[in-house]
Amino acid sequence: MIFPSAINNDMKKSFTLIEILVVTTIIVLLTATAAVSYSQFLKQSRDTRRKADVEQIRAALEMYRSVNDTYPTVGLSQLTTPTVYIQSIPKDPKGENYYYSGSTSDYFLGAYLEIASGTCGGSCEIDGGESNCNYCAGPYGVIPNTIVNPPGPGIPTPTPTSAWGEVPTPTPTISHGGIPTPTPTTSQGGIPTPTPTPPKPPTSTPGSGQPPTSTPAAG
């Protein structure tokens, strides 16, 4: 014979389907968040190493120029043979080569950062292909990116508006004597601004000998 107290104890010891689903959902969300954070951490670590590699190559390039009075014009391999200015040419953490282009008095060194926007020139190797470099350096230091988040095609240029969301465009009209009369505009709160009435041009009666008289503007 099963007593009611025994049934209640068994129900308390077990989990309902809703409880299992809630716990599973929480575990999945925490795992996904941790995976994204870890992926971002790896990207930042690789980008930090790329920047350090660029500075290391730059130091070797300056040593080369101080001895030869020119920068390598063939490639970075000139830094290791016949004279060793650097033990080995650093490579991208993913195994790709850094971009280099040099002349006797100038050089351009480029890398591709995974967390960066814009381009600075050159074509960097990445994942077996090529992409525009977004971290570049020259004799005078790091070259800033020239294009950062360019607007896509078809995006209209926003028109500046006033604080009240309206851009009044006055259209002048010609009144007496060719004097333009401004169109009344609406001020804050929707109260129309009175427009001053321009004075009428002086009139005179031909042959009267009287000087021209002007009519004062109405208030």
Image (spheres, grey):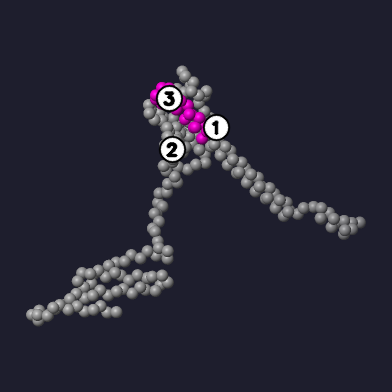
Quadrant (top left/top right/bottom left/bottom right) for the N terminus? bottom right
Residue under the point 45% across and 42% down: 118
Residue under circle 2?
Answer: 143
Judged left or right of residue 38, residue 164 is left
**Position above or below: 162 against 197:** above
Residue 93: assigned label: 1
Q: CA distance from mark 1 to mark 3?
A: 29 Å
Mark 3 residue element: helix
Up the image or down, 45 lies above or below 90; here it is below
Q: Residue furthest left?
A: 207
Q: Main secondary structure of the magenta part?
A: helix
Relative to 200, 142 lies left or right: right
Instruction: Place residue 212 in its image quadrant.
Output: bottom left
Name which residue type carries label 3: Ser
Look at the image and give the residue range highlighted in magenta: 51-75
Label number found at residue 66: 3
Query: Measuring 49% from the left and 21% from the top, which residue is drawn there?
Result: 84
Point out the frontmost of discs 1 and 3: 3
- Marks 2 and 3 sit apart, C-alpha to C-alpha, by 22 Å
Res. 128 in view: no
Q: Residue furthest right?
A: 1
Residue 186 percent coordinates (x, y)? 37, 70
Q: In the rendered image, is residue 83 in sight?
A: yes
